[in-house]
Image (cartoon, grey):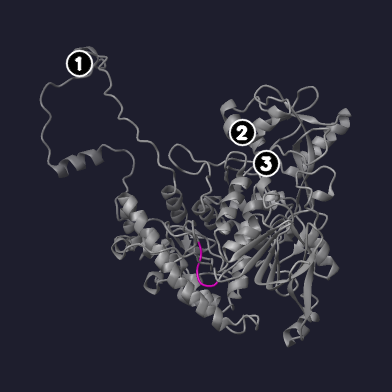
Amino acid sequence: MAENLTCDVVIAGCGVAGLYAALKMPRATNIIMLSKGAVDECDSMLAQGGICVLAEDDDYDAYFEDTMIAGHNENRAESVDIMIRGSRAVVSDLIGYGVRFERDDEGHLAFTREGAHSRPRICFHADETGKEITTALLAAVRKMPNVRILEHVEMRDLVLEAVPLSVEEMAAERSGEEFPKLTGVTCAGIEARTAEGEVFTISAHDTIMATGGVGGSYERSTNFPLLTGDACRIAQNHGIACEHLDYVQIHPTSLYTTEPGRAFLISESCRGEGAVLLDAEGKRFCNELDPRDVVTQAILDKMAEEGSDYVRLSFELVNPDIIKTHFRNIYEHCLEAGYDITTDPIPVVPAQHYFMGGVHVDKDSQTTCPHLFAVGETSCNGVHGKNRLASNSLLEALVFARRAAYRIAAGRSLPVVMMPQATFERIVRKSAPAQPKKKPAPEPENLLGTLDPESIKPAGTFVSTDPAPELTDEEAVSAALASLDAPVVVPGEDLPEVTVDGEEMVDGAVEVVAEEAAVAAEGDGPEVEAAPVEAAEKGAVPAGEGEAAGDADDVSEDPEPAESSEAADSASDEETDAAANAESDANVAGEQSADESDGDCEPEAKAAEVEAAETEDAAEAGAEAADAAADDEDIADEAVEDATASDDAPGEAASEDAPADEAPAAEPHEKKE
């Protein structure tokens, strides 16, 4: 008989949401993770298209609107905002963990576009983005000595314990809320079952359900068969609220086959790059970039009209090089099935793909049962509404997994703050693969030989043979400026004021006055975070092995041996950026109030743990900054300039060398393409 286990946090599911939640916990947290099958049998591995990111500030409104329109405006606006604002920190973090997003020739992130997106904003790795991200996160988790992964073990049930009712809970019982919290009980772990049928209990202070979607319940689905909606079934058995269980997304294009088994997805990004849908006569019949539910209905209508089993997808308008690189996995799979997509259309048919409903959660991924969280496709946080926008699933899973981890570790909500665009761009630039040095271009050949200038001058032009008059530097500059028709921008002139939602911006970061930040820290005002200006003086530096610099909203740590103090001193400016990036979260967890804690979370002990974590983080970040400075003097000089400018642009004080967003006491979500 299997032995019962005890831990701090148990996570059912090893997709991107479960893995990222584990990575965002403090390293002192004892974590057990379950995988119903092998760890690579999760839908996160199957996501092809990519992950969205708000690369530029001016895309916020369009991205928000695209998400809402795709979801038929049934989305929770607050959740959509949280996801978009958290996208830069998450993508920066993924880069730090070693995810190899495609780049352009200059090292910038390459973006693709999919259906219902008004512009390209999707980062990708060929057509296997989910596999690339999941593999990188799994590798990082496997390095954590505090995490134990149990494969071929499923969550069979929840363990609920009776607890006395508090005054607040009794008041909440009578509040008439749409999704009232369970009272008189708390989640104390899960009941698990091995592949051999042995049942055992895992006792835990907090439980995270990340068991994926419901595709295994459908005859034709792009999901793994083992994804059968376990979390929703178990939650309903215990009266834990679920939401929109009928919101199931059908993907327009899976490869048609008469063979049984999981349907092979043909990514929506194929249509984003120019692939078109054709009827039996070879004619287009819909707008391929409409939302998924609209395209799916158009295909089903055409199949009914023709009495056919499929329609066709043609890649004729897609560059063959793009097919063999961006879509290499699809290209190779279709070749194995007997189709060469560079020359012939392929048969496609709609298939079940994604579950927008799930276990109801709030903005911190908390269910209506105390100490029980749900993340990824298992949960319904309202981001997707009635229909998911393409490539929002990975982002939503990661953003809300991070928030769950933070809530568990810090006992409060992660402040909603957006990484400045300039910081994100620096992280991307510094992480770009080294480009091979180009040979200098040869001197252009003088094709004119010794032609007389008189023979090539415009007719009627006087060519003077007198030497040019000598000018002083000031005269030369004045003459050059006078010759320009365009207005001249003089360095030092005041630039126009930039605002976002009525708030002043400094290089993309919202300036928040200290009073507002203090109110937010106490939980009595809007969720804003003060620009991290003084963090360097306090030594609060984000950490986490392999992570890129973010906006310091996380609370885990991943210490490594520090390098020499001389090297660290040489990179002090970059340390300042890294330190500033984590100050807000350090203060958040360190100053956690008793009335915000759960009562049994021992906030004083957590604060002590956080303080120790910050000390280790500072040493690690110093070492990383030293290495980066030694390897790249030019970038170090740039960091010095950034640090110098931070007095005027406090929102930019974030490190590119330290991993993204980790701080004082921890935070812990998942979905696909």
| Image location of residue 364, percent across then percent down | 65, 68
The residue located at (79%, 39%) in the rendering is: 350
Mark 2 and mark 3: span between their CA atoms?
Answer: 20 Å
| Image location of residue 576, percent across then percent down | 37, 65
Write the start and end of the magenta stretch as one range: 661-665
Q: Secondary structure at mark 1?
A: helix
Secondary structure mainly formed by the magenta segment: loop
Q: Secondary structure at mark 3?
A: loop
Mark 3 and mark 1: span between their CA atoms?
Answer: 58 Å
> Residue 441's image quarter?
top left
Residue 99 disc label: none
Work out whether residue 87 can be spotted: yes
Q: As shown in the figure, which amino acid type bears the numbered disc 1?
A: Pro
Residue 663 is a magenta residue: yes
Q: Quadrant of the N terminus?
A: bottom right
The residue located at (15%, 43%) in the rendering is: 473
> Residue 169's image quarter?
bottom right
Work out whether residue 82 can be spotted: no
Query: Of residues 618 and 239, which is closer to you in this image?
Result: 618
Whichever of labels 1 and 2 marks the residue nearer the N terminus, that label is: 2
| Image location of residue 602, percent across then percent down | 60, 82
User: Mark 2 sits on what residue?
Assistant: 328
- Is 334 displayed left or right of 302 in the figure? left
| Image location of residue 359, percent across then percent down | 76, 63
What residue occupies the far front of the structure in this picture? Answer: 1
* Number of marks in picture: 3
Residue 115 disc label: 3
User: Mark 1 sits on what residue?
Assistant: 453
